[in-house]
Image (cartoon, rainbow, N blue to C red):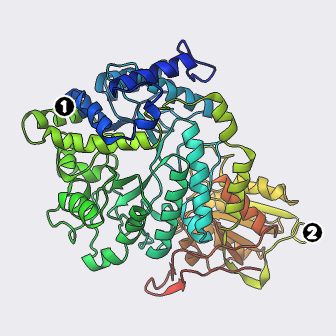
Amino acid sequence: MHDAGTGSTGAPSRRTVLSATAGLAAALALTPETAPAAVHDNKRIRALISRMTLEEKVGQLFVMRVYGHSATDPDQADIDANLKEIGVRTAAELVAKYRVGGIIYFTWAHNTRTPHQIADLSNGIQRASLGLPRGLPVLIATDQEHGTVARVGRPAALFPGAMAIGAGGSRSDARTLGRIAGAELRALGIRQDYSPDADVNVDPANPVIGVRSFGADPEAVADLVAAEVKGYQASGTAATAKHFPGHGDTAVDSHFGFPVITHSREVWEKFDAVPFRAAVRAGIDAIMTAHIMVPALDGSGDPATLSHPIVTGVLREELGYDGVVVTDSLGMEGVRQKYGDDRVPVLALKAGVDQLLNPPSLDVAWRAVLAAVRGGELTEDRLDTSLLRILRLKAKVGLLDRPHVTAAGVDRTVGIPAHLRAADRIADRTATLLVNRGSLLPLAPRTHPRLLVVGADPASPSGTDGPPTAVLANALASLGFTTTALSTGTAPSPETIDRAVTAAGDADAVVVATYNVSAADSQRTLVGRLAATGKPVIAIPVRNPYDVAQLPDVQACLATYSWTDVELRAAARVVAGRVKPRGRLPVPVQRADDPAQVLYPIGYGLSY
């Protein structure tokens, strides 16, 4: 359903755009002609803040989820979910009731079905907000890290994830990724990306960061973080470095528990701080906090998100950062274990954050901040400080003068052939060959015409062509092989293993996709049984490269760092010799039998 005055994607008519701009100009005491040139003026932004009610100011601090593909006409199931979780029916009602300053898109919330639908949703949200008294445009954000975390799927261009970019080691590629990805998000009305991940992944067992990090070398991570930031922000989309002060050395997932980082201050400075300092020097628009305890930085036992010594003392005062600070989701257990949901947003603001992301109950959080100001625990001046940063960011990304997007902009930007080719070229530089006994690779259809593709098929990231085994089999078939795909899962049963071994009898070689293999994993048994057939076995770890340490029987091993289509197609081209492997490990791989010993160091990678 489209509102009056819009085109086929909900894009506004010229009259609607001029009306919205005129309304903002009036609020800023400007004419429509001078508004675009003057919205960056701090004096006028402060004037806008001075006209806001306290309730409106509180709302501007929140970035909230909302269910539905449309701002005004979502599906009934999404209306029911919104009523249950937020107390409103639609995104339009959300901005009207709480005056939220931001909205975050999720695939599971049905916000990101197709490019034109996303653009419609974004325009609908902006119309709903701008139509209110003293209405402001909404800063729409999402987690588009690429690799294993991507909320916007095909036909948008999807790039290799951070650890794959780390394996490629090219600052130019990181900058290109940011520029293209940022341009596509902007065309959809998404002006802020919660990316890049600036964590240094020094713990191979890290359950939440892993391949979302560029690697384990802080200087290399810093270079790529800075390059990606510059790419995003050159496109007019705000980048967000996360998760400060560094989530890379933890065995606990802060979604479900409360991690503790035991680094000394010296170790923190040497590892975790380096990429964030680089992001600040690169002019990063926003930094996201982590729900982790770092006793070396704050001995109170509070999570970093709620820590004044960390957010204000370290990030703002020591690192000199004065941009927007956004919390990680306030629905995560890491921030909820010590304090109630009514205290968390207040303490976060007292710590020095600006944006409060996705509280479990917006009503509880909104009322708690309002009560804290009325009761004197927070001052209105404190809110104004954050509002100034938030509105500066909205002005910088063009929201205050051009909040809407168009169908034509979507069509000329999102998933265009040049962007897709760039993603493939970058992926070709990331696949990392770790084992190649007897120079098995590259394979040729004339010597190994029949390939069996088996292995793990984890849940596919948004917008893929199917499970990894099918994508790999199809990609290899397009390169001249006759392929058979057999999904054996992440925990193959003895019966499934038997079926794979039987199928290998008709193959000239076997390609096995592995996923986070451990010593007692039945995936390891599968690979061993297949190798015992005498057929050449090529392992392709589709997430962590650490799998190679558990696979001593394979003749070849090629790490992709993710199971997205772009990386799997690149792996197929390397297997077939269409491109040479160029990736180098951005993390060390320890021996399986002696983790104190390094099997493959940072920088290791074979070619042929």
Q: Residue furthest bottom?
A: 597
Q: Residue at x 48, y 41 (%)?
A: 191
Where is residue 330 drawn, in percent x and y? 29, 45
Q: At label 1, which amino acid type do we have?
A: Arg
Q: Residue at x 62, y 63 (%)?
A: 173
Where is residue 244 drawn, in percent x and y? 33, 60
Q: At label 2, which amino acid type do we have?
A: Arg
Where is residue 38 drawn, in percent x and y? 41, 36
Upstream in sequence: badge 1 or badge 2 = 1
One can see residue 416 in this view: yes
Element class at badge 1: helix
Badge 2 is on which residue? Answer: 446
Q: Residue furthest left?
A: 375
Q: Residue at x 81, y 63 (%)?
A: 451
Task: Give neighbour class at mark 1: few <14, some 14-19, many 20+ (Cα, 10 Å).
Answer: some
Q: Quadrant location of the N terminus? A: top right
